[in-house]
Image: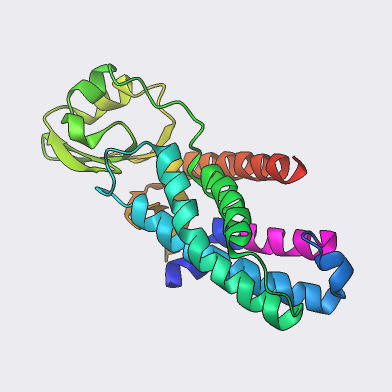
Amino acid sequence: MVRLVFDRWRFAAYLGLTGFFTLLGPFGTFKDLDIPNRLLYWTIVNAGVAIFASLAEDSLFAPGQASSLSRPVKAGLSAAVGAVGGAVVVSIVELNLRQNIPDPLLVWFSVAVVCMLIISLRRQVWLPEPKSYAPFFKRLPANLGVDLVSLSMSDHYLAVRTVEGSTMVHMRFADALDELEDFPGVQTHRSHWAATNHAEDLERDGARHALRLSDGTLLPVSKANLEAVREMLDRKREMQLEEMDQQVSA
């Protein structure tokens, strides 16, 4: 639950959608509620939906979970499961603020559609998977898939982590970076690399910096690579905001 509150991307999306829905007043709330009650309505509804959808999303996208499912399918299941709890919250708010008993199936479907859009945007499920026949991925067990999270060098072995698990590969770090030249990611340290899709935020402890990944792992960031990491995160956030604006406009 703490991660749900302090995940900056989710919190920004929550604030943006709450403000947007309060002003727009969709689903009849513009006609039925004044601005203060509309703000209260969407604050509670969006918070409830966000919590249930995030719990479902994090469960299905956790390393090793539902490994046989593609990212779009995981996003759909996360939305469908999270929408159950979200629909309950919507129904309670509807009853108390609008004295209305909505159709539960219609509420669930509406919540699921919104959740699907947000989860798909966050997980970038529309991006093509890297080619499975790439030399680097041929070195990995097939069950680990190709959704790469990070690389870390340890002695003469490379620790490779994907969303499905981890393994050790006997190869040089520089050779791995050469084979992954076209894979979206950034070198954070002389012995560490992170995939852009799973890079979340830059944290600081005194003079030291670390990159937080989607599974909570912290990778050290050297001074030499700090600017590159910041630029990667800035580009990623800009793309996410642009996609969110396009989804809302549509």
Depicted 27 relative to depicted 160: above or below: below
Q: Residue at x 46, y 45 (%)?
A: 75
Whether residue 64 is visible = yes
Locate residue 81: give its quadrant. Answer: bottom left
Q: Residue at x 36, y 49 (%)?
A: 61
Whether residue 209 is visible = no
Depicted 17 relative to depicted 120: above or below: below
The total number of labels drawn is 0
Comparing 29 with 250, the one in front is 29
Instruction: Pick the quarter of the image with the C terminus.
Output: top right
Q: Residue at x 55, y 48 (%)?
A: 116
Locate residue 37: give its quadrant. Answer: bottom right
Residue furthest to the bottom = 96
Q: Position of residue 69 (x, y in %)?
A: 33, 39
Q: Position of residue 97 (x, y in %)?
A: 74, 80
Q: Position of residue 163 (x, y in %)?
A: 30, 44
Comparing 238 with 23, the one in front is 23
Q: Does 155 appear in magenta?
A: no
Q: Does 21 appear in magenta?
A: yes
Q: Classify residue 26 as left or right of residue 241.
A: right
> Bounds of the magenta span?
13-25
Q: What secondary structure is the magenta-colored segment mainly? A: helix
Q: Position of residue 45 (x, y in %)?
A: 64, 70
Depicted 92 relative to depicted 180: above or below: below
Instruction: Pick the quarter of the image with the N terminus.
Output: bottom left
